[in-house]
Image (cartoon, rainbow, N blue to C red):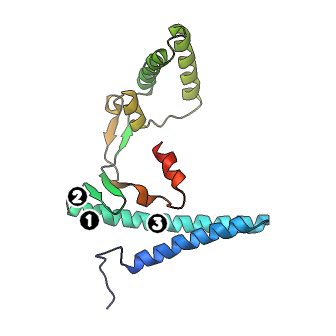
Amino acid sequence: MPNTSLASYSTSIMKSKLDFVIATVEAAKDFIGSLDDFSARAALDALAHVKKTRRKMKGLEVILEDIAIAAMLHADIENFDGDGYTARLHPGGHRKGWRHTELINDVTERTIKQRIKQYPEVDPEILARIVKQDLIVAYSVSRPEWRTTVLRRLGVEANDYSTKGPGKQSIEITGQATYDETNPSYMEEVTA
């Protein structure tokens, strides 16, 4: 009867297979980098295949995340320190009922105050006009999806301008082990 349990990932056949996938991707990148020429057909066929592979990997990620969420909830774990990474159970949720006009006005006022401190040599009224005009243009040409982390950095509490409904839980994984160790500059960019 086949084994239906996974007690240790680090010694599992699953890890060996995924390590092989990673090595194969690296080898494919090296191979492509060594080529001098690509036909359009070959490039498009390869791109379609890579996108298919990415979708399959995303499917595996979703399955594993669902299993990990269930395991963390069952064991009453909110944070977990692994080998080179930290996992945090994120409660999920989505926001609705945004009061966009009030929020853009608050963000504008806070940004003006910030810029006046940043550029004390510039007339505050001129700065205010510039900031307002820039934010009006940005707001009018886009459909804002407010980022609560950025709002928090500005000192704005998203709960004051929206309501939060339940959503799908997720796991936030951070740490060096989640990045490509062959490209350490990527990690530096992310943490900068």
Q: CA distance from mark 2 to mark 1?
A: 8 Å
Near mark 3 (Cα within 10 A), the count class, few <14, some 14-19 or many ≥20, is few
Please tell me whether mark 3 sits on a helix, a strand or a loop. Answer: helix
Give the side of residue 148 with respect to residue 19, left or right. Answer: left
> Percent position (x, y) of residue 29?
63, 66
Label 1 vs label 3, nearer the camera: 1
Q: Earlier in the sequence, mark 2 or mark 1?
A: 1
Looking at the rendering, in which quadrant would you find the N terminus? bottom left
Please tell me whether mark 1 sits on a helix, a strand or a loop. Answer: helix
Residue at the spot 41% in from the left edge and 77% down from the top edge: 14
> Percent position (x, y) of residue 165?
32, 43
Discs 2, 1 touching: Cβ within 8 Å: yes
Near mark 2 (Cα within 10 A), the count class, few <14, some 14-19 or many ≥20, is few
Give the residue type at disc 1.
Ala
- Res 71 label: 1
The residue beneath circle 2 is 77
Residue at the spot 34% in from the left edge and 88% down from the top edge: 2
Label 2 vs label 3, nearer the camera: 2
Residue at the spot 54% in from the left edge and 51% down from the top edge: 185
Task: Say whether residue 98 is visible.
Answer: no
Give the side of residue 160 with respect to residue 19, left or right. Answer: left
- Res 125 label: none
- Res 59 label: 3
Name, please, the residue furthest toward the bottom: 1
Discs 2, 3 touching: Cβ within 8 Å: no
Label 2 vs label 1, nearer the camera: 2
Please tell me whether mark 2 sits on a helix, a strand or a loop. Answer: loop
Q: CA distance from mark 2 to mark 3?
A: 24 Å
Q: CA distance from mark 1 to mark 3?
A: 19 Å
Discs 1, 3 touching: Cβ within 8 Å: no
Give the residue type at disc 3.
Gly
Q: Earlier in the sequence, mark 1 or mark 3?
A: 3
